[in-house]
Image: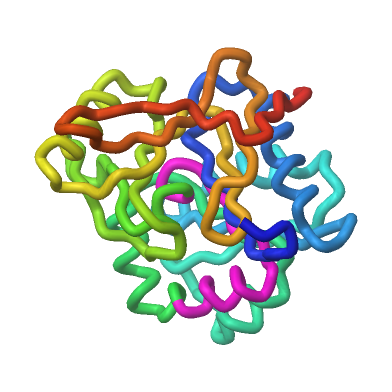
Amino acid sequence: MSEHDQRHIIAIGGSGFLTDAQTRALYRYVLNQARTTEPAICFVPTANGDSDASLLRFYTSLSQLPCKLSHLVFFRRTPRDLRSLLLSQDVIWVGGGNTRSMLAVWREWGLPEILREAWESGIVLAGGSAGAICWFEQGVTDSLAEVLVPLDCLGFLPGSCCPHYDGEADRRPFYHQLLLDQHIVPGIAIDDGVGVHFRGTEPYRVVTPRETAGAYAVQLFDGEVQECQLPIETQRLAS
């Protein structure tokens, strides 16, 4: 990892267990990685169908922080020049929901190429759940009802990602079984309320306002699944 690599992705396991103050602490950390003291942040809520509730939560959570807020929707009138809109941001935040549907919509609109250009230009990419796994080669998703499945994602980051690792009882055993069956490549599991900050394509720092939560490298070794907690400059965020 190069300290001079200006490509940033912050993948958050989910918002479970977090208070409003703790949620703002994670937002504050993400905003602090931007290139300006009052960053422009664009919320992309495609995964939940651009729901009004998610937009309200976003604007309410960030209204007390020093930033300029906007959003991008695809299920209503969509801006014509997506590239100019997104490349004018300092942070792009992707919300949770149905990752498979989100990626299908993005590909129809040519968004993956724009997001890669944004990332390579130094714009911070971040998000939780669907907004975390989308950046990896593969993710564990509940996009199908009543079952978890592996999903091919954008591939900006190597390996796979499993969010909600301590927030949903079936996440850990299912991720392990996918690895044992070789249906998914090794990767990173992230507890709710935990952000893994990547600089370039390697983990740089783990951040969380939760005392007992973490993130883990999960891989196969001699036919068994091994977990190794990521200690990389772990920061406990003040909420």
- Viewer-closest of 66 and 180: 180
Residue 128 drawn at (x, y percent): 50, 43
Viewer-side residue, 186 vs 50: 186
Left or right of 203 in this view: 171: left
Vertical placement of residue 158 versus 78, above or below: above
In the displayed image of the protein, which residue is found farthest to the top? 212
Picture quadrant of residue 235: top right
**Quadrant location of residue 147?**
top left
* Direction left: furthest residue: 181
Compared to residue 128, the image places residue 154 above or below, namely: below
Answer with the quarter of the image where residue 199 lies.
bottom right
Residue drawn at (65%, 83%), measured in percent from left and top?
84
Relative placement, left or right, of 229 versus 177 is: right
Magenta stretch holds residue 123: yes
Residue 101 image offset from top left, x and y in percent: 29, 59
Residue at 53% x, 20% y is 213
Query: Is residue 1 found inside the magenta-colored segment of the image?
Result: no
Q: Quadrant of the C terminus?
A: top right
Q: Position of residue 184 (x, y in %)?
A: 21, 47
Quick check: 39 above or below 60? below
* Residue range (magenta): 113-131
Position of the N terminus by quadrant: bottom right
Q: Is residue 77 left or right of residue 25?
A: left
Say which residue appears at 25% left-offset and 46% top-offset: 143
Q: Position of residue 81 (x, y in %)?
A: 58, 85
Indicate the colouring scheme: rainbow
Position of 4 with respect to 192 (left or right) is: right
